[in-house]
Image (cartoon, rainbow, N blue to C red):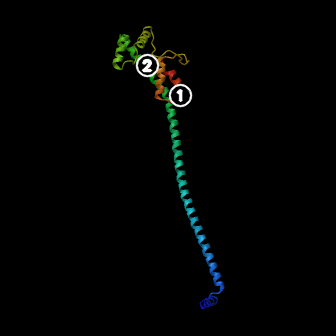
């Protein structure tokens, strides 16, 4: 009992009531400070995550810009390729015309040298391969030369497209489709008007 009285005496003399209240206030301030520290740490974490996300976004935007640039370059390349590709039929037609004129010139020269259709056909087959020019085509042109034909050019043709279905036409169109499965019908008709004879 004496200890309790001494305790009360010491408490009242050395630690007045306001000291206990002040300690209570300090504890409350300590808790508030800890809460502020926690908030600041969370804020710092969020700012760091935002910074990292911003860096990632910058890299994504750079990659997207590269992809767009490459895509535009690819589009330009495709356009240029398409322009060149569209010139191929005309070049092919020119090449075929030159080849025809060369063969017809060969036929006329050898006919003038006194060779007949069979001999010319044999020479062409030996020099090239079987089927470079058919015997009937050689005989047809020699007959034209016999009848006074001077020109090696084809006769003017009707501008109407070919409407006859033949094995040769079917094979020619099939070859075009086999070479390019995505070929358009318009392209096939323009080629077939020029190539299929």
Q: Are marks 1 and 2 in contact (CB under 8 Å)?
A: no
Residue, x 65% and y 87% (percent of image)? 16
Reply above or below: 59 against 159.
Answer: below
Q: Position of residue 51 (x, y in %)?
A: 55, 59
Mark 2, Cα crowd under 10 Å, few <14 / some 14-19 / many 20+, is some
Pick the residue in front: 31 or 138.
31
Residue 196 seen? no
Task: Tell which tag, 1 or 2, sits nearer the viewer.
Answer: 1
Name the element at disc 1. loop
The residue singled out by tag 2 in the image is 100
Q: Is residue 123 left or right of residue 81?
A: left
The residue singled out by tag 1 in the image is 184
Mark 1, Cα crowd under 10 Å, few <14 / some 14-19 / many 20+, is few
Reply above or below: 182 against 134.
Answer: below
Name the element at disc 2. helix
Q: Position of residue 11 (x, y in %)?
A: 62, 88
Reply above or below: 116 against 91.
Answer: above
Residue 110 seen? yes
For the N terminus, which image quadrant?
A: bottom right
Pick the residue in front: 29 or 46.
29
Residue, x 39% and y 16% (percent of image)? 106
Residue at the extreme top of the image, as rendered:
147
Residue, x 46% and y 28% (percent of image)? 179
Counting residues from the start of the chain, the first of labels 1 and 2 encountered is 2
Reply above or below: 3 against 34.
Answer: below
Q: Position of residue 10 (x, y in %)?
A: 61, 90
């Amino acid at each position: 009992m004496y200890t309790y009285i001494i305790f009360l005496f010491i408490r009242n003399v050395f630690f007045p009531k306001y000291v206990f209240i002040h300690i209570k206030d300090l504890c409350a301030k300590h808790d508030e400070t800890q809460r502020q520290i926690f908030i600041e740490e969370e804020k710092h974490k969020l700012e760091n995550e935002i910074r990292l996300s911003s860096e990632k976004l910058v890299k994504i935007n750079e990659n997207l810009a590269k992809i767009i640039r490459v895509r535009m370059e690819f589009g330009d390349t495709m356009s240029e390729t398409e322009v060149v590709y569209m010139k191929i039929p005309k070049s092919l037609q020119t090449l075929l015309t030159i080849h025809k004129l060369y063969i017809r010139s060969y036929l006329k020269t050898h006919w003038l040298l006194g060779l007949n259709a069979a001999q010319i056909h044999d020479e062409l087959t030996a020099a090239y391969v079987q089927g470079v020019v058919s015997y009937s085509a050689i005989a047809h042109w020699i007959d034209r030369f016999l009848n006074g034909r001077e020109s090696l050019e084809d006769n003017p043709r009707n501008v109407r497209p070919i409407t006859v279905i033949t094995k040769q036409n079917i094979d020619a169109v099939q070859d075009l489709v086999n070479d390019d499965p995505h070929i358009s019908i318009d392209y096939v008709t323009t080629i077939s008007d020029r190539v299929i004879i």
